[in-house]
Amino acid sequence: MRRRLLVAGLMATIISPLMVVGVSGAATQTTPVLAAPPASGTPATQETDVTTGSPESASSLGVTVPPEPPQGVNLTTLSDSQLAEYGLPPRPASNSSSYSGWEQALSQASAYTAPSFASTDVSNSTQLYSSNWSGYQNYSGPFYQAQGGWTIPNIYNGGNNYRYSSSWVGLGNGGSNSDPITQAGFEVDTYPNGGYNIYPWWEYYSPSNTCCSNEITSFTVSAHDSVFVEVWIDGSDTGFYVEDVTSGKYADFLAGGHCTCSTAEVIEERPTVSGSLPLMTILGATSFSNAASETSSGGQWMGNAANYEYTMYNPGDGLVLAYPSTISNGNFTVTRANED
């Protein structure tokens, strides 16, 4: 079952696919204002050695960094107890939808980087009436694991503006303190000088903790690299795994606490910056793959489980900013539409 969330205004409550209840209480049909994707402009230039904020220690963030896995070993050959010892994503059942993404990513992981962190002013928040999310969310949890991979797309010069975009994997819906969005992903920002920065990050987002994500500074990422993210429940903690599959660089760690995990997500977001929605990075289409989630019944492709589909709008004028293709198993594409 898929429910498509197309919300043209603020303060709306979904009552059926393609229908909303506005502040007046009257049911209205939403009509997306859709234009062609942005014209291929001048490519932005990657900046190096960019850190968004001040260094943060693992202990100050409630993070446990497990021991480094053995070098030169295919991580998929480790035993289940070794995967747990090194804080790596647990092995799914071989017949699980989650297995192929796990196996592809961990078999390519060749360069461990001990995770280090820095503060940001960026928050990847709960769904704000479709003004900030594009992608898919499974519901009818609880969920214990979510994963997804994608390729960093073309990145274009955003003119005389700072622009922000973030793609991520998460558990939980962020609507209560007991069900925070537990999430990790890759941020793509562009600057007025024509430069761009890509970095991995993680965050707990809840009503009492709305700021901010933590940059993972232990490795860098380039446009067109393939990346993979997994988030899972590990006892009383949450496990995080981020990998640049192209370079083989990866980092993994545990953070104290976890959500009740009523939902699981793979999302492209216009994140909140210093409390406001910014202009969104001008990107090519982002192709997601191996989007899957786990419940007590086992793994499932996101497209084969009950899900919401999100199209991102500019509040006020209803202009579409990004929209997902139909999801097939765990594969879909988010297309950046208008340049806001």
Image: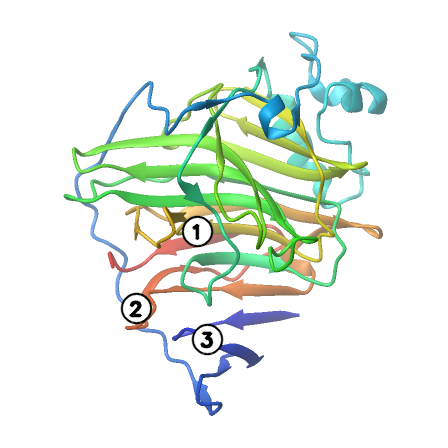
What amino acid is found at the position of numbered circle 1 in the picture?
Glu
Mark earlier in primary sequence (2, 1): 1
Mark earlier in primary sequence (1, 3): 3
Asked where in the image residue 241 lies, by quadrant, the reply is top right
Q: Which residue is mark 1?
A: 269
What amino acid is found at the position of numbered circle 2 in the picture?
Leu
- Mark 2 → mark 1, Cα distance in angstroms: 15 Å
Q: Residue at x 76, y 31 (%)?
A: 90
Q: Which residue is mark 2?
A: 319
**In the image, residue 265 above or below residue 251:** below
Spot occupied by residue 14 in the image (x, y as percentages of width and height): 55, 77
Image quarter where the C terminus lies is bottom left
Asked where in the image residue 225 lies, by quadrant, the reply is top left
- Mark 1 → mark 3, Cα distance in angstroms: 19 Å
Spot occupied by residue 52 in the image (x, y as percentages of width and height): 37, 29
Q: Is residue 138 left or right of residue 250?
A: right
What amino acid is found at the position of numbered circle 3 in the picture?
Met
Q: Is residue 3 left or right of residue 79?
A: left
Residue 152 seen in the current view: no
Q: SS for tag 2? A: loop
Q: Residue at x 81, y 36 (%)?
A: 235
